[in-house]
């Protein structure tokens, strides 16, 4: 597979609001939330909080974290890890930007989603 085939174009950079999120829908699969930080960094995270599955895309972006709107867990956008004292991890996806467009790694989109935590 060529490098070009390894990445799926999902939207224009400007379609991801600064300090906000845009949802990438995957039919039959959990959505992915694309986040854009104040300093224009892009991150892609499964749109489910590891705590109770809350929609991270509806959370508040601060620094390199998003706070889940349901129970206030802060999740690292780069690694998906919950900030202590909370414990858990949301799945992250490789993302790249090229010439104003956002791309996600195809191989990661095809991988199975992690099970939900019962907590």
Image (cartoon, helix red, strand yellow):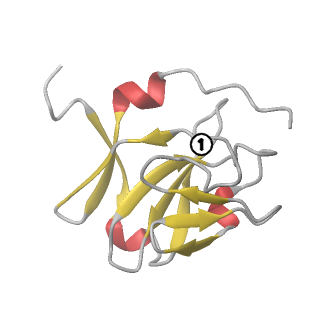
Name above or below for residue 62 compared with residue 11. below
Residue at which label 1 appears: 90
Q: Residue drawn at (55%, 47%), measured in percent from left and top?
A: 81
Kindly indicate the quadrant of the structure image that contains residue 29.
top right
Q: Where does the C terminus fall, quadrant-wise?
A: top right
Q: Nearer the viewer, residue 83 or 64?
A: 83
- Image location of residue 44, percent across then percent down: 46, 51
Kindly indicate the quadrant of the structure image that contains residue 101.
bottom left
- Image location of residue 106, percent across then percent down: 36, 31
- Image location of residue 27, percent across then percent down: 62, 34
Q: How would you rate the neighbour count of disc 1 (Cα within 10 Å): few for under 14, some for 14-19, many for 20 or more?
A: many
Q: Nearer the viewer, residue 37 or 5?
A: 37
- Image location of residue 51, percent across then percent down: 77, 45
Marker count (numbered): 1
Q: Residue drawn at (49%, 22%), measured in percent from left and top?
A: 111
89 relative position to 41: left or right: right
Name above or below for residue 53 compared with residue 28. below
């Amino acid at each position: 597979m060529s490098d070009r085939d390894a990445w799926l174009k999902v939207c224009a950079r400007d379609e991801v609001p600064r300090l906000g999120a845009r949802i990438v829908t995957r039919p039959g699969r959990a959505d992915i939330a694309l986040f854009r930080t104040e300093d224009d960094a892009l991150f892609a995270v499964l749109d489910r909080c590891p705590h109770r599955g809350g929609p991270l895309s509806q959370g508040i972006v601060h620094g390199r974290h998003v706070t889940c709107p349901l129970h206030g867990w802060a999740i690292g956008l780069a690694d998906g890890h919950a900030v202590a004292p909370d414990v858990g991890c949301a799945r992250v996806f490789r993302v790249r930007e090229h010439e104003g467009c956002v791309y996600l790694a195809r191989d990661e989109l095809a991988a199975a989603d992690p099970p939900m935590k019962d907590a």
